[in-house]
Every structure is written in C-alpha cells, then in structure tokens.
Image: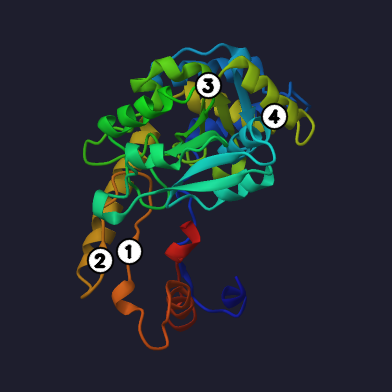
Amino acid sequence: MELKRQGRDVVSLSAGEPDFPVPPHVEKAIEQALQRGMTKYTASPGVQELREAIADRMEIEIGQKWGIKDIVATAGAKQALYNACQALLDEGDEAIVPCLYWVSYPDMVRLAGATAVPLECSGENGWTPRPEALEKAITPKTRAVILGSPSNPTGAVWDEETMRGFARVLEKHPDIAILSDDIYGRLVYGGVEAISILRVAPQLRERTVIVNGCSKAYAMTGLRLGWACGPSAIIAAMNRVQDSSTSNPSSLTQYAGIAALRGPQEPVEAMRQQFEKRRDLIVDLLRAIPRMGCSKPQGAFYVLADVRAFLTGRIENDTRLAEALLEEHGLATVPGTAFG
C-alpha cells in the first residue's frame, strides 16, 4: 500500500479472493432487500430462509441433510472456524492443523488457549497429508482436527482414499471433533472432485462441523457470509460465542446469500473455468523459468512455487525474496514460510 501511495505500479499476486464481480442476481437481491428495509437485527444464527437455503445447498454438495438448528450463519467462513475453536477448545488442549496451512488456523487455535499441532506433508506426496501422519500427531490432549481441502496455499485436493484413511484413524478416537473447511470445494480443475469427510464417512457426523461460505464460489468476499453445519449441541455453543460477540451477520448479506444459493449457478462454473485457464497459464510461465519449481494445483486459486534455488547471497530466505520482488519489481507475493 505504501508503494502505491508513492505512485508505484504494483502488481499484486497476494490477495486470496476472486477478482470477478458479484453475480447480477445477487446484486439485485441486495438492492431489493435494502428497498424492503431489511436493515435490522436478525436472529443471531441467521434468518430461517437463509439457513434453509444453506441446508439445501449442503445436501446437494455433501449428501447430508441438516435442520436449521444445526446451522449457524456467520460473518465469513473465518468466523465459523473461530467460533468452533472457541466452542470446542480449552486451555491445555491440542488441535491438529494441516501443514502447510492457511495462516489463520494456528492463530484461531491459540486464541482459544489451545496448542496447534502441525499435520505434516510435503511436495513429494502432492502436499497431501497421510493418514499415518494424522495418527502420529494425535495425543491424549487432542480435541479437534482441522481438515482443509482444497488447500490454501498449495491447491492440493485430497482424494477419496486419503479421506477414507483419515476417517479410519478418527473412528478410533471418538473424543476428537472434526472441523472441515470446505470453502474452496467448488473451485477444482482437471476433472478432480473435492470430497468432504462426510461424503465418505457419514458415521462421523455427530462430531463433524462443516464450514463453508459464499466468499470464494460467488465472489462475495467483502460481503462476509459463511456458515457452519454440525451437531446441534456444537452449533448452539458456537451461536453463544457469536451472540456475545458480533451477533448476526449483516442482514443485507444474508439476503444476498439466499439469492446466491438458490439462484442460477452458472456464474460459479464460468468463474471456475476462468480460474482453470489462469492456473494453466501461470504454471506454464513459472515452469519456463530456469531452476523454478512449481506443482500444479488441483483446486482453489493459489500456486506454490519452489524458489529454493534462488535463495543465495543477499536473498537468504523466501521472505527476503518476496521483499525484493516487491521493492525492485513491483510484484507483491506471499512467502511460503507464512504458511508453516
């Protein structure tokens, strides 16, 4: 931002949001809600019509049906994850987070007084953690595990075999809650399918919280609408956290969400196709750079480049490389160490 204020031309590859407009029917729904005076408080977990729309959409995507008491609408999927951590974790607990991870996962765990334990993976196995690594990470203090596929920042999509392996491990540990971050589930490429844990292990439903939202699939990042579906007792605890902090998500945004979920879905597919073309282009461009490594993401809209060959001399680490790219070339990126 400082460079932009100085008049520098900066190309940003750092923001985790679609650069597409909100679908027209969603924009119209906001206008209509405003004209109808829908600007007052609503029930803290969201209006009934929105939660019904969420239930219907999740049944389509996951094959599970939730009642409105099993759903809480939040100010983005981030708040749903935060509320879940606050509801489920206490001082001295541990929560397993996939590593590499979205930067907020460990912070959310720590804010609940718990310790974030990394679930390690590597580029050699496609940035997909293995079930045996999950088993190894579990201790008597483990109270929750966060699953995130498609992954931010790797773009990895965990296949059915992997998810079934996780399920087999978790079946042996009935006291561990499962938080499934499905926010990128509709942005997958090359015929790959994102498989949520309950698709392969519905028997884990009574301790699984599914988190999703409108930000990524419908390009509604700034409108802040997410949700959680799960066991009514956990959802009630999450709602108590929300009721004592932010109350309901924006009333106008809730009606935008209804329109997004119930309206035409073609804009989602059109955006997905454009992201796939962009993925192919950026991967080809990066791989054309000598000594540059780059895996091909299967989902989300991030590319994780292997820059180790360039970390020499004055560029001693990836953070310094990111600083040099910004200062010398006006290119904003995020260093990989930020993700664990």
Please name the residue that numbered disc 2 is placed on: 293
Question: Who comes first in sequence, dot 3 or dot 2?
Answer: 3
Question: Who comes first in sequence, dot 4 or dot 3?
Answer: 3
The amino acid type found where label 1 is placed reads Ala
Numbered circle sitting on residue 23: none
Please name the residue that numbered disc 3 is placed on: 207
In the image, 283: left or right of 4? left
Position above or below: 138 against 330 = above
Question: Who comes first in sequence, dot 2 or dot 4?
Answer: 4
SS for callout 2: strand
Position above or below: 24 against 119 = above
Q: Who is closer to the viewer here, 81 or 176?
A: 176
Mark 2 or mark 4, whichever is nearer to me? 2
The amino acid type found where label 2 is placed reads Gly
Cβ atoms under marks 1 and 3 closer than 8 Å = no
Q: Who is closer to the viewer here, 291 or 263?
A: 291
In the image, 281: left or right of 251? left
Q: For the residues marked 2 and 1, what is the alpha-carbon distance in whole angstroms? A: 6 Å
Q: For the residues marked 4 and 3, what is the alpha-carbon distance in whole angstroms? A: 29 Å
The amino acid type found where label 3 is placed reads Arg
Percent of width and height locating residue 33: 66, 27
Q: For the residues marked 2 and 4, what is the alpha-carbon distance in whole angstroms? A: 45 Å
**Image quadrant in which you'd find residue 80:** top right
Numbered circle sitting on residue 251: 4
Residue at figure coordinates x 42%, y 24% from the top left: 172
Please name the residue that numbered disc 1 is placed on: 305
Other-residue count near label 3 (Cα within 10 Å), few / some / many at <14 / 14–19 / ≥20: some
SS for callout 3: helix
